[in-house]
Image (tube, helix red, strand yellow):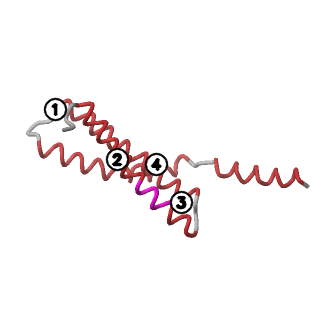
Amino acid sequence: MIFKVLLIKKMRNANLLKIQWKELIVPALLGASLPLALISFMILTREPRFESWMYSPLLIIPSGGAVGGIGIYLLGCYWFSSGIKKLLAILLGLVLYFVGVWMASVIAFALTGHWN
């Protein structure tokens, strides 16, 4: 009897670890689109011509947004799928998303020497 209960618990945990990688593409694209649009607007409107230092922020900051978007999806829709836990998970995910995008921007601009 105990073995059956342990087997059922193990099967439930195994289902939590099965992630459909195709489902993560949309949250990653949504998470990366806002930082990409904002950083593109900020960089390209300030400088009269495109320079090589602009590649780093244009790649690193949306990557941080993509990771944050995946984190929000996993927290809010995959791991905690109902009730007050879902609301708290989404709020925590949003805070972590904006902190992650901010940290990615600090790293990107510090690498180029434009963080002051």
Q: Earlier in the sequence, mark 4 or mark 3?
A: 4
Residue that numbered label 1 is attached to: 51
Mark 2 element type:
helix
Q: Main structural element of the magenta stretch: helix, strand or loop?
A: helix
In front of the other: 79 or 84: 84
* Three-letter amino acid code at the position of disc 2: Val
Q: Residues within 10 Å of mark 4 (few under 14, many from 20)?
A: some
Q: Nearer the viewer, mark 4 or mark 1?
A: 1
Q: Which mark is residue 25?
A: 4
CA–CA distance in space, label 4 to label 3: 14 Å
Mark 1 element type:
loop
Mark 3 element type:
helix
Q: Earlier in the sequence, mark 4 or mark 1?
A: 4
- Residues shaded magenta: 89-95
Q: Residue at x 50, y 63 (%)?
A: 88
* Three-letter amino acid code at the position of disc 4: Ile
Residue that numbered label 3 is attached to: 77
Percent x, y of residue 17: 64, 47
* Three-letter amino acid code at the position of disc 1: Glu
Q: Nearer the viewer, mark 1 or mark 2?
A: 2
Q: Residues within 10 Å of mark 3 (few under 14, many from 20)?
A: some
